Image (spheres, grey):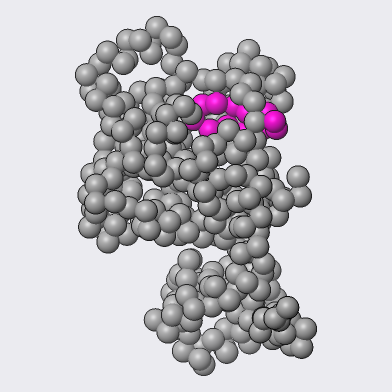
Amino acid sequence: METSLIDIQKRILPDLLQVMQKRYLILQYINVMQPVGRRSLSVSLNLTERVLRSEVEFLKEQDLISVSSQGMHITHEGQEILESLESVMRDITGIDMLERQLKERMGIRKVIVVAGDSDQSPWVKSELGRATASTIKDLLQPKNVIAVTGGSTMAAVADMLTPDFGQKDLLFVPARGGIGEDVKNQANTVCSIMADNTNSRHRVFYVPDQVSTEAYQSFIKEPLIFEVLNLVKSASMVLHGIGDAITMAERRNTSPEDLRKIMAGNAVGEAFGYYFNEAGEIVHKVLTLGLQLSDLANIGDVIAVAGGESKAKAIRAYMKKAPASTILVTDEGAAKKLLQG
């Protein structure tokens, strides 16, 4: 069996790979968070000031970063090195293998794993956003209706979209109502930011996240709501998060009666108003206006984004019901935990 150069280096020069990994992480963090100060870099990457000082000095001498009174920035050359290093680092850290194993185990279209754990390092959420943005870009057609759910992870995706996306005809629509959640993470707000960042269009969907049966029947007769609902159902792409069941139930101000039902059913995950137990069974369903789980089968590109070791149970539960067309974007923290189960 042929031994790869990486395998040889791991045996002969393990220190070299460790140094490379450390410098890659520093460049990656500066790229995402720039301008960044030495203190926050030291805390976020868990490096001592002394180690960081010598690394920063080296990267500066190589013209990979620049240092000013505002903080550190990555240079154009640094950006190029970072991009070139990406595939090498994926091989070194075993991320490629993680992706293949998870794709096989979950029976879905594709798994994309970013380095780090967003539970431990909040900046990794920006990397999830960046990887999702890149995935969206690869899938765009000449005309696109993109349905988007709310949540902080979707907000991180919105921040990573850029004006060049707008060269395609994009229309962002909220996948479902969202009044009642934190405004900045509502689907309406996320869609608006995505449209602004890509010079595209969006529609708003001002209806509650959960409604009574009577209100539901009344709402769907409203022409504007009916029109947006039809747009949502005609989406060519869906971007959605996966929530921890109890966290989502509390965020929605769920009634004590329903909360008891969710807890009694041992729900661990939530998506689109459906609560799942570890076996992937639906233990509770919120009546929501917008996209339903059954609608996903008719949508070509479904991208689920969730990271952090604490989300592993929720991801595993939802993936038992997810359509085979799903692309999962996650991080190492969740991916490693998912493979343990």
Was residue 16 drawn as part of the magenta stretch in this picture? no
Figure quadrant of the N terminus: bottom right
Q: Is residue 175 above or below residue 39?
A: above
Q: Is residue 114 left or right of residue 10?
A: left
**Closer to us: 2 or 284:** 2
In the image, farthest residue toward the top: 214
Residue 63 pos. (x, y %): 46, 89
Q: Residue at x 51, y 88 (%)?
A: 60
- Which residue is pictured at 51% across the width and 20% down the height? 286
Whether residue 289 appears in this view of the structure is yes
Taking the magenta stretch, the answer to whether it contains residue 276 is yes
Residue positioned 44% across, 38% down in the render: 150
- Outermost residue, front side: 1
Which is the main secondary structure of the residues drawn in magenta?
strand
- Is residue 38 depicted above or below 94 in this figure? below
- Tell me: 1 left or right of 132: right
| Boundaries of the magenta span | 268-279
In the displayed structure, 84 sits above or below 180; it is below
Question: In x, y percent, where is residue 227?
Answer: 24, 25
Between 192 and 264, the one nearer to me in the picture: 264
Q: Nearer the viewer, residue 243 or 232?
A: 232
Residue 322 x, y percent position in the rendering: 54, 36
Residue 275, quarter of the rendered image: top right
Q: How many marks?
A: 0
Across and down, in percent, residue 53 comes to: 62, 84
**Residue at (24, 47) in percent of width and height:** 143
| Quarter of the image where the C terminus is located | top right
User: Is residue 311 visible in the rendered structure shown here?
Assistant: no
